[in-house]
Amino acid sequence: MEARAAHAHPTLRSFQELHTYLERARLGARGGPTPHPETHQPGEACSGVAITEAARKTRLALDALWAARKSLHRDPAAAVELLAAVDLDGVDPRTVEQVYGEWLRQCARLGLERPYKYHAAFGRGAVLVRVRGSDRLRVVSSIGLPDWPPGTSVPRRELPGLRPLR
């Protein structure tokens, strides 16, 4: 039995590592119960509530990513809308990168005339197009920027990292 556990399937091994991590977080860094989430200090172990919320949000992000890649692969507008609605705060960084990248790929498939991408921060950005006869840009879609809904007009000079979307 011990030899079989040593050669466990990689998924099972990852599950065992996750279980160990969650147990350590539940017990806290000093082996005692974790403090209430409101009294959490930086550098201390996270509470089980925070881990559960992060895991739930990561699962939702992965489900949206799967749907955008599989179910909605023929409808880039629906995929963009679905991915833009995902709350990426507290989500696993690798998942954030995948969701953000897929969102950009789907935006590129929308058939927009000379679209631009604006990267505001990790997992946050917008795809914009020019407003004819103006120095302003119109938001087509944004992810992680709730104050920038589609249709919002933004002066181009306020977007220092603006790049063409390819």
Image (spheres, grey):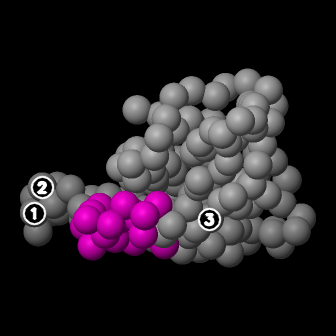
- On screen, residue 159 above or below 13: above
Left or right of 72 in this view: 78: right
The foreground one among 130 and 46 is 130
Residue at mark 2: 7
What amino acid is labelled 3 in the image?
Answer: Asp
Does the magenta run of residues contain 104? no
Left or right of 39 in this view: 150: left
Count the numbered circles shown.
Answer: 3
- On screen, residue 79 above or below 129: below
Residue depth check, mark 2 versus mark 3: number of the one nearer the observer? 3
Q: Earlier in the sequence, mark 1 or mark 3?
A: 1
- On screen, residue 104 above or below 27: above
In the rendered image, residue 112, in percent from the top left (x then y), is placed at: 45, 46
Q: Secondary structure at mark 3?
A: loop
Does the magenta run of residues contain 76? yes
Residue at mark 3: 87
Is residue 21 visible in the rendered structure shown here?
Answer: yes
Query: Toward which corner of the image does residue 70 lie, by quadrant?
Result: bottom left
Residue at mark 1: 4
Answer whether labels 1 and 2 touch (C-beta < 8 Å).
Answer: yes
Q: Residues within 10 Å of mark 3 (few under 14, many from 20)?
A: some
What amino acid is labelled 2 in the image?
Answer: His
